[in-house]
Amino acid sequence: MKILPFGIAPLRPSIRFMLIRTCPWLLLFFGFIAGTVLVHPLLIIASWLVLLGFLYHVFLLCAELYVISPEMFMVSTGILNKTVTWLEPLQIKAFNVHQSKLMQYLNIAHVTVVSDDDINIKFTLKGVDHPAMTAALGFTMELIKTRHEYLKRLIDMAEKATANQK
């Protein structure tokens, strides 16, 4: 994971997660190819349809982008029907991390971000690399704490300046 200037951390679903999600399509493809040779030559049409399904799922997973920064959490999904959902960090109520046994072994996780009750936005970062996600969130939290301390000092200086004028 590369953290860009200004604390922007782009994340994508892990390659390991893509392999888990697309492996059934590849198995179906090779099964239909074997069926073409052993059963009937017209099964090649079904194998091409399965291959198109495989490619669609690969491109769909490659099109997902998650951006974590001190200003916003953003999820961009979809190929043709692009959907962008974003949320400010101050509006986040909870993070829920889900890992199955296989995901724990592969060190990937689904992270669900839940907003305050007023906004009611909920999105899931699917199959992100767990160490990369932890590093991105840690870096973002450090930047938010630094900004908070800086703004606190500015407010204190402004209060002292107004107190001296009175």
Image (tube, grey):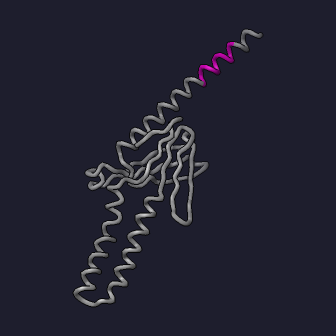
Magenta stretch: includes residue 153 = yes
Instruction: Judge by depth and name the residue closer to the eye, 63 or 103.
Output: 63
Q: What secondary structure is the magenta-colored segment mainly? A: helix
Q: What is the x, y in percent for residue 4?
A: 49, 39
Q: Residue shown at 51%/64% (left/top)?
A: 79
**Quadrant in which the C terminus appears:** top right
| 42 sits left or right of 151 in the view | left
Q: From what the image shows, is residue 63 above or below residue 144?
A: below
Q: Total label count?
A: 0
Q: Residue shown at 32%/86% (left/top)?
A: 43
Task: Quadrant for residue 72, please give it.
Answer: top right
Instruction: Judge by depth and name the residue closer to the eye, 152 or 118.
Output: 152
Query: From which residue to which does the magenta span run?
Result: 151-160
Q: What is the x, y in percent for residue 23?
A: 31, 66
Q: Residue shown at 28%/52% (left/top)?
A: 106
Q: What is the x, y in percent for residue 31?
A: 26, 78
Q: What is the x, y in percent for residue 78?
A: 51, 62
